[in-house]
Image (tube, helix red, strand yellow):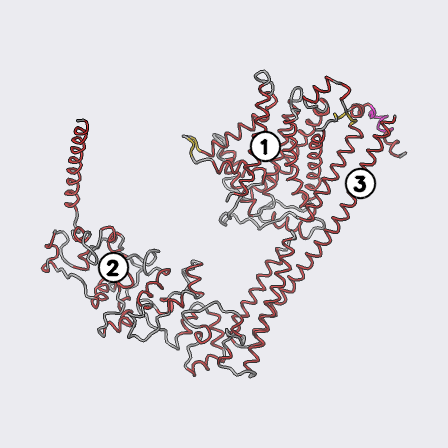
Amino acid sequence: MGIWRNSGLAASRALILMFVVCACGIRTHAQTTNTCLDCHGVLDPPLQVTSEKFAQDIHAQKGLTCASCHGGDPTKSGMDAMSRAAGFRGKIQRSQIPALCGSCHSDAAYMRQHNPSLRTDQLSQYKTSMHGKLLAKGDAKVAVCIDCHSVHDIRPASDLRSTVNPLNVAETCSRCHSNAEYMKGYHIPTDQFAKYSVSVHHEAMVVRGDLSAPTCTTCHGNHGAAPPGVDAAQNVCSTCHVFQSQMYEKSSHKAAFQAAGLPGCVVCHGNHGIVHPTDAKLGTGPEGVCMQCHTPGDVCDQARAQMLADLTRLDDAINGANKILAVAESSGMEVSDALLEQDQARDSLTKARVTIHSFQTQLVEQDIQAGLQIAAKDQQAGKAALAERDYRRKGLGLALIFILMSVVGLYLYIRQIERNGARS
Amino acid sequence: MNALKATRDWLDERFHWAELVAPLKKKTVPVHKLSYWYFLGGITLFLFIIQVCTGILLLLYYRPGANEAFESVQYIMTRVRFGWLVRSIHSWAANLMIFTAFAHMFSVMFLKSYRKPRELTWISGMVLLFLAMGFGFSGYLLPWNTLAFFATKVGTEIAGQVPIVGHSLMVFLRGGEDVTGATLTRFFGFHVAVLPGLATVFILIHLALVQYFGISVPPKVEERWKASPNEAREMKFFPNFALREIMAWYIGLGVLGALAAILPWGLGTKADPFAPAPAGIRPEWYFMFMFQTLKEIPAKVWFVDGEVLGILVFGSAAVLWTFLPFFDQLGRGRGRKYVMGAGVFAVCYIIAMTIYGYLAK
């Protein structure tokens, strides 16, 4: 009986709960003006758009609804909401997407109301891009707005979860560009992302979290994405590597590369897979790049050898000073001034490595000499610190001998007076 | 030797020197297997004298001020002749002095030398221990390096948690709301004027009390000696014990010199008040057990703020410890058992928490 009574009580409670839930549901439904999500929230993909997903969308947050893009009347329920009479457009054709997005994003007056700092030239730029040009030719496979920005959960680029956040751009591009099957027929490589993933730029961006480091769009543009072209490659790199570019501009390589139709920086450094350059690039080993064009023993080869020797000399001098200063520091000697000056020596080495792009040995030599002087001074400071350490230790040894003798003397004296005391 | 005798005669004629030193000549030190612990007080005094001497030498070059302190210590370490030795000895002796002061305190406690009539000797010794910790806390900031700056920030923040007077105490210690150059000059003032003055007064009181009451014999040894007076052994303070003490001081000097020459005290990097606090901010080792305890206490214990509770517990423990001799005879002698138990617990707790503090991340 007890069980029955309890079951009855539970059933009553469940009924009351159901009534409350239904009442709340009716109340909620009455207040909803975007009825699209009521149905699309429970549909299977690709028609599924949940209210949780759409709430993440910057457009939803700015007050836009499904009808803003798809038309229809979201205040009506069921199929009435999708009435053609109410302007319902249904699924937007891929070829029409850029124009649809552009209808707002190219309208400066409209955009000013929501995000005044946002540019409004995306559509015009897109039309100049390889994607835009191919789309105009009827190729619906190329990227349109939603391929990069996502759809129904579009976030601002500053949001770390956005597909176009600098941290995620390369991966977004790679979804198509690394797909050999999808890219078949375009006759371009599909290893860009694999190469970029091991590059110094990727390391700066992902490992060091430097959002100013280059990703795909930094060199290729975003809405106007296109290969920079042979002539423009140096201009692209020079936006960050200013001094290297200035040196290269004045060098003999500039005219020679242009004449040969070679893409400037890319000839020696590569493009997507740029790794941290080492002095070995000036060498004749597997990493060396000079001898790919130059003849052994010619004037340029001699200049290359001299610049490499200079860089190695300064690098060795800095490492030598570092080593002796580290020993002095670990011995507790105060060498912070010299360690600080080592930074200046390293700066000279970095400057010399930049000056290499001028391919003028005398300019490189100037930077090398400045660094060598500092490294020699620091080496001397390290030696002086070690000499001082040895002097201290010798002094300590003498002092300890004196202390030991005094202690022994005291001990003998105490023993003597206590023996004398015992006798008396 | 004639000059020495002439000087003694000269003093005797004017000040009755022989009468003045007569009690010292009569002074004796008990000899038993625990007599070695008697040296600790003298070694602590020796290290204090070293601190005063090296501190005065450092004062010749040290400049208190946020823009000059670090550079002046760097100058002492690199340019001043034997400046490295003076500063390293000052730093090492400071740490050794606190260690020997703690060891002296616990040895006095376990030998039960605090018992009647030496209650005031114990209290004056406890005051000296607190002053030594004050020396350590104020001196730590003076080189104005990163670690000291942030450790002082944390330390004064903890002082700010003291109920009722906490904020005023923090502002008083810092010379404002934040640790700035004003804190440095204030700590410098405490370190070279206020604390040495107080320490000198209490050292004189402490020594006078030791001289007045003589050196205590542990109760068990005392009972044995009473039962068989022939077993009682003692030595003259002058010259027998004093010479032994000088031997210990010499050895202490050798240890200090070796530490200074082989492990010179580091300087670190200059404090930057605008930089974020680096990882691993720690106080000096003798504050570590309290610091680690405060870190381990939950944010709220019942309705009381965890940090406030920790401060109250440590504050109460310090007060009770200072007046420990008065608990010795409570409860028909059971008090001593509790005191010894508390002593063993305190030693174990301090050692364990200090080790944990250095191992914990």
Label pair 3/2, CB-CB below 8 angstroms: no
Q: Position of residue A243 (x, y in %)?
A: 48, 70
Instruction: Report the residue marked by disc 2.
Output: A151
Q: Nearer the viewer, mark 1 or mark 3?
A: 1
Question: Which amino acid type is marked by label 3?
Answer: Ser
Query: Does the segment drawn in magenta span residue B11?
Result: yes
Task: Find numbered disc 2 in the image and state the secondary structure of the residue it sits on.
Answer: loop
Instruction: Report the residue marked by disc 3.
Output: A406
Query: Does the segment drawn in magenta span residue A19?
Result: no
Query: What is the C-alpha distance between the residues marked 3 and 2?
Result: 88 Å
Q: Position of residue B215 (x, y in %)?
A: 72, 24
Location of residue A208 by image quarter: bottom left
Q: Chain of mark 3?
A: A
| Neighbour tally class for label 1: few under 14, some 14-19, many 20 plus, Cα within 10 Å | few
From the image, give the main secondary structure of the stretch colored magenta: helix
At x 65%, y 27%, the residue is B108
Q: Is circle 1 on the same chain as circle 3?
A: no
Q: Is circle 3 on the same chain as circle 2?
A: yes
Residue interval drawn in magenta: B9-18
Instruction: Report the residue marked by disc 1.
Output: B347
Q: Chain of mark 1?
A: B
